[in-house]
Image (tube, coloured by chain):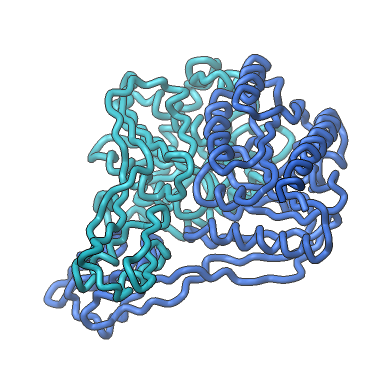
Amino acid sequence: MILAVASGKGGTGKTTVAVNLAACLPEPVRLLDCDVEEPNCHIFLKPEIHSSERFTLPFPTVDDNRCNGCGECSRICEYNAIVSLKSKPLVFPELCHGCGGCVEVCPEKAITESRREIGTIRSGTWRHVAFVEGLLDVGQTLSPPLIRAVKQHVGTGGITVIDCPPGTSCPVIAAVHKSDYVVLVSESSPFGLHDLALAVDTMRKLDLNFGVVINRAGPMDHRVADYCRKERIPILMEIPDERKAAEAYSRGLLLIESVPGFRKLFENLYRRILSESRRNPGSMQGDRRDVEGIA
Amino acid sequence: MKEMVVISGKGGTGKTSLTASLASLSGASAIADCDVDASDLHLVLSPEVQRLESFKSGHEAVIRQDDCIACGTCMEKCRFNAVHEARRYGRPSLFKIDPLSCEGCGVCVRLCPEKAIDFPERTCGQWMVSETRYGPLVHARLAIGAENSGKLVSIVKNEARRIAKERDLPWIIVDGPPGIACPVIASITGASLALVVVEPTLSGKHDMERVFELTKHFDIPTLVVINKWEINPGIAGEIERGATSAGVPLAGKISYDNSVTAAQIKGIPVVEYGGPAARDIREIWHAIERRMESIEKPSVIEV
């Protein structure tokens, strides 16, 4: 089963839910940190890293001697990554999405592909957790290919927990794609509710099965719980707004190990996810091929 | 004209609450909400929308089933696994393109031997110009799962710049998205000052260091604000020292104050609600003004 932990708004507690959930499971689990712009899971698990590889994307290289300056490459490129000025085309690797179109259409077979590094994939272990994270290089713009590459470690069987980036655009889609269940983490505030509604729209559009965790739940504001009830969305867990939890988080500690009562909360969350994902399997049909990156 | 962008690396550190207050304190500014994925600034600035434009960007491949001969070339050539084949008994397979996986590269369109793939423009969201009591607000809504958020960010920012110039406003204040990639880079490009909001947590510190690398990479003067500093005064101290050694001065610290949430619930900037956080933000605004003065002087000589 693939469990993705997502949210519209940033900073609602995705990483907290992902790491504590993975850490409290009674069986081996894979934890994939797909928030490749700012991966934080390692801060809480401190896994022992045993492999670290650079991740690359293809980009075109033009052979001067073969190029006849026809400009076909430039015409097919939707990203302005290769620009033909009658002579040898100019290549802008950072704009290239690696679609391979220019290689396909070059009548002189003058284009080959080189590879550029955009990030790192690190793997390690912490107790029963097999850990993989992506780390995008600073200055790089394109995170979805790296997210897809991290997701190749989903494996078959067992449980995989995915920590997603915030938002509702292409990086999030890449991260939640083909999950069996999505946990949306929200907080009870006007901003929290507004962004939760966007995340809910996204999950419905993707036809994914999901439930909500309300973080920092306090007596002040019930709008998120009211919204969930109105929309018939299961509330999987409410994380109480406790100073102790905020302090433990700030020091990079697991809540299940440092705040009394939290282990029970997360164990219940897991049971609840299991029963919810069985209850509504309708949205889990469809193409179940493994996710493949382009590189 | 001064352009300040509020960013954070890590999400949820208080960018939007701070931006709203700074817009209120600045007196006259054009405001740009560049968090086009999950924009919230309009919730506290009560905008009245004056102009609404749709955001079209890129293309999407769509197979015309009547003309498809099911040769599978599109699936073979697509590097984004966007083409799906449904095998059918006694009939050729049905090929379909998943719009959410389609990268809009056009390779299948070009290589289809029957020219059976259309390539219409994609509507990726909308952007708006509104009036608020703090000045004009340019904001946007990216369509779900859409690409090119960086391009939409650039549109929002350029429109705010155009309006600021037209109305002779001294400030452009930009609420940035979290992260460090495409939309963040588009938000900070050309800014005169980046204000990084961080909470005193190990995650916050980790993400802040990556954002500093980014602003350094693009050569943008940077200030840091520590929000809710009392959560962990020890880490707050580490952040302050780390920032100083990275050449980033501290603009100020904001107290953990329930009036921030109360102001959000009321739908107004914190500085108008009052409380310890409001006082801290006023101090921060003065620090920003002082920093801008020292940035502006040498740049006049350079020009």
Residue B27: image location, x then y, percent: 87, 49
Residue B110: image location, x then y, percent: 29, 75
Image chain in cyan: A
For residue A145, above or below residue A53 = below
For residue B263, above or below residue B90 = above
Tell me if I can see residue A291 in this picture.
no
Q: Residue most toward the left? A: B90
Residue B143: image location, x then y, percent: 54, 62
Q: Residue at x 79, y 51 (%)?
A: B171
Total tally of numbered discs in the picture: 0
For residue B37, above or below residue B229 = below
B271 relative to A163 in the view: left or right: right
* Quadrant hosting residue B75: bottom left
Q: Residue most toward the bottom? A: B66
Q: Residue at x 77, y 40 (%)?
A: B292
* Closer to the camera in the image, A231 or A152: A152
* Closer to the camera in the image, A26 or A110: A110
For residue B252, above or below residue A178 = above
Residue A254: image location, x then y, percent: 49, 20
Q: Colour of chain B?
A: blue
* Closer to the camera in the image, B132 or B251: B251
A178 relative to B279 in the view: left or right: left
Q: Residue at x 30, y 69 (%)?
A: B107
Tell me if I can see residue A289 in this picture.
yes
Q: Residue at x 82, y 39 (%)?
A: B289
B276 relative to B198 in the view: left or right: right
